[in-house]
Amino acid sequence: MNGLNRSLLAVAVAGGLCGGVGLVHAGILNGAPSAQRLDDEKNPHMKHALAHLQYARTELAAAGGAFKAHSAEVLAAVDSAVKEVQAGLREQGDSIDVPADGPPIERDVDAKFPHLHHGLDRLIEARVELAAAETIFAGHRDKALDSTDDAIRLVENDIHDVDK
């Protein structure tokens, strides 16, 4: 089972065991920028995904030297996913604005390379939101999912490499 499948399985188990409370604890709902305002939007899952992707990019860009070899590829994949989500929202006549006033990201000061881990968490959250979007958004959602999956795989590889 690859890292992405393990991560998604862990989220599903946490949600199933705790009746949704596990999702908050696992970070799927916790830390979503202005979640209530995004939930009131026309396409809340896409808006949540966009916010998580933007936060992931900030975290991953801050990771700097933690990347072994994939930093440019990861950032390009995240940028591609952001562009696809934005294109999908525009296709639906929705704005691409998401609140920038989300809560600060809590750092585990004992974690090795916290930016990589937090970026990965945000990518997984974005993937969950993209998968939950009910509209295909003229294929843009699927392209965003593919790019997000690529970014997750690359970050997991880098985390594995730096943990050696």
Image (spheres, rainbow, N blue to C red):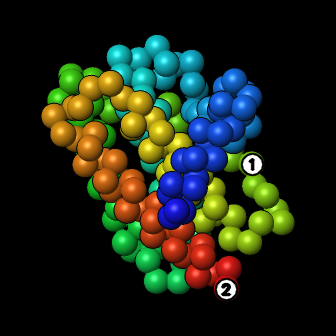
How many numbered marks are there? 2
Give how far across and how far down residue 111 sits, in percent.
77, 66
Which quadrant: the C terminus?
A: bottom right
Q: Residue furthest right?
A: 110
User: Measuring 51% from the left and 74% from the top, which residue is drawn there?
Assistant: 157
Label 1 sits on a secondary structure element that is loop
Depth check: give the residue in front, 24 or 40: 24
Vertical side of 3 occupied by 90: above or below? above
The image quarter in which residue 41 lies: top left
Vertical side of 101 occupied by 64: above or below? below
| Residue 32 visible | yes
| Residue 60 visible | no
**Location of mark 1 (residue):** 106
Name the amino acid, label 2: Lys
Q: Residues within 10 Å of mark 1 (few under 14, many from 20)?
A: few
**Location of mark 2 (residue):** 164
Q: Residues within 10 Å of mark 2 (few under 14, many from 20)?
A: few
Give how far across and how far down residue 71 sits, in percent.
45, 74
Q: Is residue 34 left or right of residue 146?
A: right
User: Measuring 66% from the left and 30% from the top, which residue is drawn there?
Assistant: 16
Name the amino acid, label 1: Glu
- Closest to the camera, between mark 2 and mark 1, is 2
Q: Is residue 56 left or right of residue 102?
A: left
